[in-house]
Amino acid sequence: MPVRFQGKGASIAEGSGHEHEGRLCAGGGVVKKVSIVVPVYYNELNLPHLFSRLFALAEANPQYDFEYVFVDDGSGDGSFDLLAELAERDSRVRAVRLSRNFGSNPATLAGMHYVTGDCVAMIAADLQDPPEMITTMLQRWEAGKKVVLATREDRGDPLVSRLLSSAFYWLFRRLAIRDMPAGGCDFALLDRRVADILVEIGEKNPYLIGLTLWLGFDRDVVHYTRQKREHGKSRWTIAKRVKYFIDALVAFTYAPIRLVSALGIALALLGFGRAVLVGFARILYGISPPGWSSLMVVFLLVSGVQLITLGVFGEYLWRNFEETRKRPSFIIDQVVGIDRPDREAVAVMESRQVVARDREGDD
């Protein structure tokens, strides 16, 4: 039975569309609209350059209407001030501010709540991914692809970043989703139906590219060279990379549990074999090997494996606990350029409903 998503976009599973008001094309139909969602985090220096390239993209594709949804993910610089000023001057721009830093995936998901286009492109604000690629991606979308992924052939990042990224995608391809492009992917264009389903899923620690691949829609891949960051400094710390990796892996595979189970079986067999050898040595040769040092090695090894196992189980249990708490993935603090009051932040509405249910239970 096909899954039917209730609430906003309840008929998504049946493929019913959405509507937006747009200008008419020469043939009498409505011009298609392209929504571009950009999570922003300490990108004050990048934004002027990003604006000019995004607006140039619209000029190069006059057959489409464009809208830009910028989501400030708790930046501490002047990023939102620039976004708000632009949203006041340009009707195509929406500026959304989150109450704190929630991460690039929740920020992108927040932006998807406000899009009105026929397709949705998600791209980072640091200009390492070229906005001009969206033209090629639109061509693939017009050819019938529901998902167009932009994967990296090469990248101008520092050596440590390249090594960590390569290791992450190598593991993710082998342990979770084999369809993940080998070069990795954060830059994509989605049909509106796909974007709506991502919004309806509502995971607390969403990995949007992984979810997009999991959905299984017809897709295509384009290739590009990731550029070196020219303005500002990356806030993508090692701690954030580790959390990102764990969230993505735990959400799409139980391989870590299988691995620790296999390790436990291997250690049990090794211990049993060792016990057999010691027993034969004692019976046949009367040898009683001194055991303190070897016993301590075995004890520490087994204890370490037990702690690793508990840690792996804890990661899965913690994420299950997060899903049951019903906290929203993000909280909207402020919006500028949003002229439709019925599209208020779903996360805020959800949190209010949870509070109301809790109060009813207390009564």
Image (cartoon, rainbow, N blue to C red):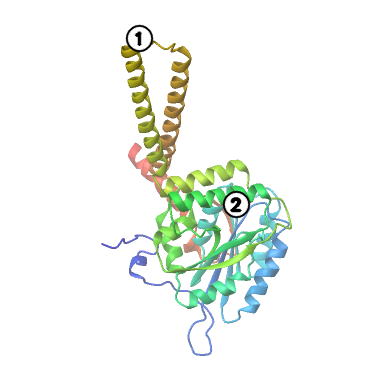
Q: Quadrant of residue 135?
A: bottom right
Image coordinates of residue 200 in percent, x first then y, are: 41, 58
Image coordinates of residue 110 in percent, x first then y, are: 52, 56
Q: Quadrant of residue 276?
A: top left
Q: Which residue in the rendered view is the most extreme toward the left?
A: 1
Residue at horizontal 48 percent and vertical 85 percent from the top: 29
In the rendered image, which residue does mark 2 sit on?
A: 73
Residue at horizontal 31 percent and vertical 62 percent from the top: 4
Can residue 303 be seen at all in this image of the molecule?
yes
In the rendered image, which residue does mark 1 sit on?
A: 286
User: For mark 2, does the 10 Å Cα neighbourhood hold few (<14), some (14 to 19), or many (20 or more) residues?
Assistant: many
Q: CA distance from mark 1 to mark 2?
A: 70 Å
Q: Is residue 256 above or below residue 203?
A: above
Q: Quadrant of residue 8?
A: bottom left
The residue lying toward the viewer, choosing from 24 and 15, is 15
Q: Amino acid at mark 2?
A: Asp
Q: Is residue 51 above or below residue 173?
A: below
Q: Amino acid at mark 1?
A: Gly
